[in-house]
């Protein structure tokens, strides 16, 4: 399993905002076509780490970093690699659903049309495949022209996944995607994420340890900006190597 | 005492206070609307015609237009009678003391004849003359025959108008050359070529105008053949050309349906005709048109400018002393008296910008100004400046209401800043932009003072939009409902007769503002519906 090629990678990554260092020397390899969960207490730097892979941190005031961030073996700060092109390859889904005030169709095809895809049949195929993979197709196939804002919260979040998938990214970053959803919507979302792993690399930030156990094949535990332990999910939960990990997953802090 | 304290402490007092503030506002608005609707609405309704026998032997025929205590003899009442016949009596209205009235009746055969000149005529029809043919008033077919004659003369009048328009068109090249010639003479430039051109143009005009003038004389002659002879209350006979009759109202014979027809026809005339008699009669179509076109031009100018300004301030500019100063300046701009904007518009748009345009593009007719004088474009731009802060502030609020999550979502999908702005942020902010537009329209449509300096006139010879190239004449002066109210109400030679016209014009202006607002509000609500359920 460790022989699988890593799709996302950081090498000795330090990052933070202004005077605050959030990440302290993280070296992490995320294997391709698997779900990897990032767990850890609030403020441990999970989201900051996640947002390093598509450079979303760059928009925040005072952001700095040292060390390499690689996507498919390529440095994300490579000047020849534009921000926009990077983000076509690395999709992201946020904590709260953030559909655009457009139709369901236009939401999903937002990325491809930005990229300049004009071929109608190709767009139509992308629409269907993305919605199917996001486990939303059956619910919206008769109402693709409806405003995305009329969908329920869970549907909106799966629409956001479909929207990220439409650019056929290599990797998908999920930042606590189920935190605003009820249990049923969460179950549907997890089902979608599990299926996704057949096609893309998924890096999932979650507060919910059961969720990590249910969907992730590998899990990484972060504490105070440092990577404490990373390994096979089942192993990490049943026999953690580090005492800190054990204390966290048994609920003694966090 | 304790109950009073409780009254205040529990908030009942505050509730009553705030509620009464709302009540006062409502009462003022309702009162204004009520007065306007009552006066304007009643103005066009046909009134009965009274024949009054006065103590001194005079006989009056006219409509009753209000009663009040007589200031000259306390305890008595005096009545205002509209006697019309301005060309005979000199004034439209007369005060009559109630004690002077000896007899009063409503003669069934009395007519009110509305004329194109000299206002209303009150009298009794005697006969209709068409050429040598005479139809006496006793003839049952008089009204039908008169209606047919009015239709005939209406056609003649239209032809006359058409001929005059064509004569004007034929004269236009000559007038232009004359202006160029005098301009060239002033500048000391050679004038021989222009003189030759002018001669040729004059010859062409004479060729074109000859047959037109002949036809015009024939038409006018034909118009004069048909006349309605009436007798006034005092017994004098008077002929009114059929061509000068707008409508005849046998007021005392009309049933409700007939009155309603007159009422509707008067409103239609008010809304669709051009003014007559120094704006005190006829319609206000040019003013409605001028107002609507000016507001439209203003909106076209102010919305893009305001939106772009707000986008820069909110999306690109850093929060520093400069942007704070810009915001402060914008807020202060909203508090500048509108007449100051008028003065600025006159100095900057009319003289500086318009003057420069004239120097560069219309120098051959200088010193006659083309754009260097007030016009609808300059008025619209001045009002655009006046309403700019409203649009900027509303758009900024709209932009600030766009959730950061949605912006991040677009950026994370690989949208550039501009793509995010254009495809996600601006659609989201559209209701805010429309709110600003609504407020700008409401403010701009009711503004008068700046217009008086930048291009409004009491009577514009032609609309700013017509069938001659380039169709939209932005340099032309225009009429405006707000200025029309001022002009008719306070500058008119016949203020008393025109007063109801003021109310009717106010009503139309209010309706126009409401309609313009309503259109924008409906549009905004439709967009809001699309955005409903958005996460924030």
Image (spheres, rainbow, N blue to C red):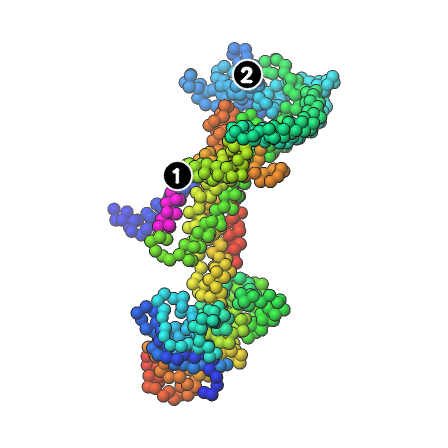
Q: Quadrant of residue B279?
A: top right
Residue carrying label 2: B89
Which one is in front in this view, the residue at disc 2 or the one at disc 1? 1
**Residue extending furthest toward the right:** B133
Quadrant of image for the C terminus of chain A: bottom left
Q: Measuring 66% from the left and 29% from the top, which residue is drawn there?
A: B200
Task: Residue B323 in the image: state x and y as whole percent.
Answer: 37, 53
Q: Measuring 43% from the left and 37% from the top, which residue is drawn there?
A: B347
Asked if the residue at tag 1 contacts the one at tag 2, i.e. Cβ–Cβ closer than 8 Å, the answer is: no
Ranked by sequence position, the earlier of labels 2 and 1 is 2
Residue A148 visible in the shown view: yes
Q: In terms of depth relative to the viewer, which is nearer, A23 or B372?
A: B372
Q: Left or right? Give the position of B220 relative to B15.
A: right
Labels 2, 1: one chain? yes
Q: Main secondary structure of the magenta part?
A: helix
**From mark 2 to mark 1, how far is it between C-alphas?**
45 Å
Q: Measuring 60% from the left and 16% from the top, which residue is drawn there?
A: B232
Q: Residues within 10 Å of mark 1 (few under 14, many from 20)?
A: few
């Amino acid at each position: 399993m460790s022989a699988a090629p890593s799709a996302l990678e950081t090498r000795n990554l330090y990052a933070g905002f202004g005077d605050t260092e959030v990440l302290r020397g993280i070296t992490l390899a995320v294997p391709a076509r698997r779900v990897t969960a990032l767990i850890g207490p609030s403020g441990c730097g999970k989201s900051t780490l996640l947002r390093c892979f598509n450079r979303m941190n760059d928009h925040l005031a005072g952001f700095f970093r040292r060390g390499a961030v690689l996507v498919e073996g390529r440095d994300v700060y490579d000047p020849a690699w534009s921000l926009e092109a990077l983000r076509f390859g690395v999709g992201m889904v946020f904590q709260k659903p953030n559909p655009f005030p457009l139709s369901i169709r236009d939401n999903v095809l937002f990325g491809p049309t930005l990229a300049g895809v004009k071929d109608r049949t190709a767009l139509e195929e992308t629409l269907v495949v993305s919605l199917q993979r996001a486990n939303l197709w059956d619910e919206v196939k008769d109402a693709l022209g409806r405003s995305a804002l009329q969908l329920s919260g869970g549907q909106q979040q799966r629409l956001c996944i479909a929207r990220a998938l439409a650019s056929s990214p290599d990797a998908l970053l999920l930042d606590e995607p189920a935190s605003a959803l009820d249990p049923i919507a969460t179950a549907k979302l997890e089902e979608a994420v599990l299926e996704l792993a057949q096609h893309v690399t998924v890096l999932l930030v979650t507060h919910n340890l059961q969720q990590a156990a249910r969907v992730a094949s590998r899990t990484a535990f972060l504490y105070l900006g440092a990577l404490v332990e990373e390994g096979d999910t089942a192993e990490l939960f049943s026999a953690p190597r580090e005492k800190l990990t054990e204390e966290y997953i048994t609920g003694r802090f966090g | 005492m304790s109950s009073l304290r409780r009254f205040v402490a529990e908030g009942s007092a505050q509730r009553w206070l705030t509620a009464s503030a709302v009540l006062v506002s409502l009462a003022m608005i309702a009162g204004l609307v009520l007065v306007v609707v009552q006066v304007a609405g009643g103005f066009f309704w046909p009134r009965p015609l009274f024949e009054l026998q006065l103590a001194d032997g005079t006989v009056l025929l006219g409509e009753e237009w209000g009663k009040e205590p007589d200031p000259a003899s306390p305890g008595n009442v005096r009545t205002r009678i509209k006697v019309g016949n301005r060309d005979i009596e000199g004034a439209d209205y007369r005060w009559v003391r109630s004690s002077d009235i000896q007899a009063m009746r409503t003669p069934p055969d009395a007519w009110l004849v509305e004329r194109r000149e000299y206002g209303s005529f009150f009298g009794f029809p005697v006969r209709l003359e068409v050429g040598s043919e005479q139809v006496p008033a006793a003839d049952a077919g008089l009204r039908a025959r008169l209606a047919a004659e009015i239709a005939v003369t209406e056609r003649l009048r239209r032809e006359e108008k058409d001929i005059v328009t064509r004569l004007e068109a034929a004269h236009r090249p000559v007038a232009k050359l004359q202006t160029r010639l005098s301009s060239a003479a002033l500048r000391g430039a050679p004038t021989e070529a222009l003189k030759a051109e002018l001669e040729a143009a004059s010859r062409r005009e004479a060729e074109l105008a000859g047959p037109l003038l002949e036809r015009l004389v024939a038409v006018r002659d034909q118009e004069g053949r048909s006349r309605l002879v009436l007798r006034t209350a005092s017994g004098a006979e008077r002929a009114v050309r059929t061509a000068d009759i707008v409508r005849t109202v046998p007021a005392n014979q009309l049933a409700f349906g007939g009155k309603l027809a007159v009422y509707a026809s008067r409103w239609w005339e008010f809304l669709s005709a051009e003014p007559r008699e120094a704006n005190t009669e006829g319609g206000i179509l040019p003013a409605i048109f001028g107002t609507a076109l000016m507001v439209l031009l203003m909106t076209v100018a102010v919305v893009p400018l305001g939106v772009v300004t707000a986008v820069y301030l909110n999306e690109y500019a850093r929060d520093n002393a400069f942007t704070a100063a810009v915001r402060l300046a914008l807020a202060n701009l909203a508090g500048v008296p509108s007449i100051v904007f008028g003065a600025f518009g006159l100095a900057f748009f009319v003289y500086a910008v318009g003057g420069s345009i004239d120097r560069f593009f219309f120098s051959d007719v200088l010193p006659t100004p083309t754009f260097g004088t007030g016009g609808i474009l300059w008025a619209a731009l001045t009002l655009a400046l006046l309403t700019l802060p409203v649009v900027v502030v509303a758009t900024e609020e709209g932009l600030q209401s766009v959730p950061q999550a949605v912006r991040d979502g677009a950026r994370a999908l690989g949208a550039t800043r501009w793509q995010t702005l254009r495809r996600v942020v601006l659609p989201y902010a559209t209701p805010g932009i429309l709110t600003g537009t609504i407020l700008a329209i409401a403010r701009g449509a009711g503004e008068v003072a700046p217009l008086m300096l930048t291009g409004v006139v009491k009577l514009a010879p032609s609309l700013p939009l017509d069938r001659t190239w380039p169709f939209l004449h932005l340099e032309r002066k225009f009429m405006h409902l707000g200025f029309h109210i001022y002009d008719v109400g306070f500058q008119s030679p016949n203020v008393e007769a025109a007063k109801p016209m003021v109310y009717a014009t106010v009503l139309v202006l209010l309706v126009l503002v409401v309609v313009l607002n309503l259109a924008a509000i409906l549009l905004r609500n439709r967009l809001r519906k699309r955005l409903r359920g958005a996460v924030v």
